[in-house]
Image: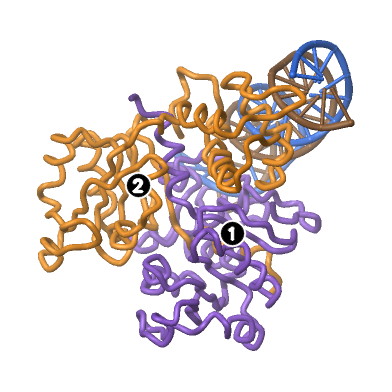
Chain colours: A orange, B purple, C blue, D brown
Amino acid sequence: MPDNAGTSIPDIVIGRLPLYLRALRRLRQEDKQVTSSHELGQRLDISSAQIRKDLSHFGGFGKQGTGYQIDFLIEKLQVVLKINQEWMVVVIGAGNLGSAISHYRGFQDRGFRIAHLFDVNPAVIGQRIGDFVVRPISAMSETIRAENIKIAMLAVPAEHAQSVADQLVEAGVEAILNYAPININVPAKVQIQYIDPVTHLQRMTYYLDG
Amino acid sequence: MPDNAGTSIPDIVIGRLPLYLRALRRLRQEDKQVTSSHELGQRLDISSAQIRKDLSHFGGFGKQGTGYQIDFLIEKLQVVLKINQEWMVVVIGAGNLGSAISHYRGFQDRGFRIAHLFDVNPAVIGQRIGDFVVRPISAMSETIRAENIKIAMLAVPAEHAQSVADQLVEAGVEAILNYAPININVPAKVQIQYIDPVTHLQRMTYYLDG
DNA sequence: AACTGTGAAGTTTTTCACAGCC
DNA sequence: GGCTGTGAAAAACTTCACAGTT
């Protein structure tokens, strides 16, 4: 759980902002200038009251009778989420998953740039994957420290996830996106998020008949 | 939102069960036989009361004074989640992401088997990716119907996600795991879950300084 | 002694509903 | 007329705390 001591804004609200942002950018792509809590809500399957209340935590971004200026709201949300800047990210693990992450072009225009790709396997170190040359994990801590990198994506086998995470934290990383299907423990000040497709699938099968 | 009309068990509870299951399997790997709500909670960063209450929705799986038999609880949770069977899954999109998904070996022992991999691009149709030969998307609906497949993983570009999802639903798919960074609309009876790494990253940057 | 299962209490989150503005 | 922002009400969720069991 994120440390909310200083602010009063619920984490669950923060978690919805990226969804609003994604939908807003989509609307802009469709050449819309203005939207409403109702329209956004319909797209996201979230009530309009919810959206208005969430946004109201950060100031009055809308206009009565009119709605929200899409460009303006995008800008504001980017500032709130601190993605009105580009964050450098490292990827650990150059297997199938790390490789797919490294090839993905969708980070760049949403606030993130992959700076390095590390792996422990001598067979892949030095090889080119996407725009990166795989670097040895032995150089990881030093690089992270030298470049003041705060965010890591972890795509190593489950059995190594905890120890690599420990190294990342020790090197100064403050946010980890863990793709390994295992819980890892980090200090409270370090942010952690998980991506495990199987948990999503298992959540859905509950509702299927069969 | 899943349709909870019939049952009274909150979706948020269902969403935690896969996490319990994952942790339990880990404990078993460590050769433990028995655990407690306290031990599980510590690993998952969830309160022990929460875990006990969640599990109590499905019956008394534990023993006072002792805790939970790990094998027994795993079995019970698998039945609750309906993964005491193997679900066939199709993957749509054979790009970097679809390819990584198709190579991933972690589905099999958690209740899912990839049956087919589809793509629209003639250049990749017929090619081998992992254990699969990429099939044309034109054959998708018929195959899904013929094999009574209920689950799909969607790894196509955002601009095609909605139309492919429509086809999937039309063909009888009842659960979609969408990797495209866009919201899609499906009938209420169809389950949908999203995987978008960027939303996770954006949620974490809010808490970083800088 | 250790731990579960659970009502009751407490907290958080969502929805309602409407005053106020464009 | 349409829409936001927001207190107040309602609903959902989590934690407490303890009786009961092994």
- Asked if residue D5 is positioned above or below residue A144 in the image, the reply reads above
Residue A145, quarter of the rendered image: top left
User: Circle 2 — which element?
Assistant: loop
Is A192 left or right of A167, judged from the image as shown? right
Q: Which residue is drawn at 10% across and 61% down?
A: A126
Tell me residue B163's x, y (percent).
63, 66
User: Circle 2 sits on which residue?
Assistant: A184
Residue at 55% over, 36% down: A17
Which numbered disc, 1 or 2, marks the residue closer to the eye? 1
State the residue in front, B88 or D6. D6
Which subunit holds the residue at mark 1?
A
**Residue in the foreground of this view, choosing between B86 and A69:** A69
- For the point 51% across and 27% down, the residue is A76
Which residue is at a point 80% across and 58% down the rendered structure image?
Answer: B6
Amino acid type assigned to the residue bearing label 2 in the image: Ile
Which secondary structure, mark 1?
Answer: helix
In the rendered image, which quarter contains the C terminus of chain A? Answer: bottom right
Which of B27 and A145 lies nearest the eye of the viewer? A145
Amino acid under label 1?
A: Arg
Name which quarter of the figure residue B49 lies in: top right
| The image quarter in which residue A101 lies | bottom left
Crowd rating for badge 2 (residues with CA inside 10 Å; few <14, some 14–19, many 20+): some
Q: Marks 1/2: CA distance?
A: 21 Å
Residue at which label 1 appears: A203
The vertical placement of A123 against A164, above or below, is: below
Toward the front, the furthest residue is: A31
Give how far across and how far down residue B59 sits, in percent: 67, 57
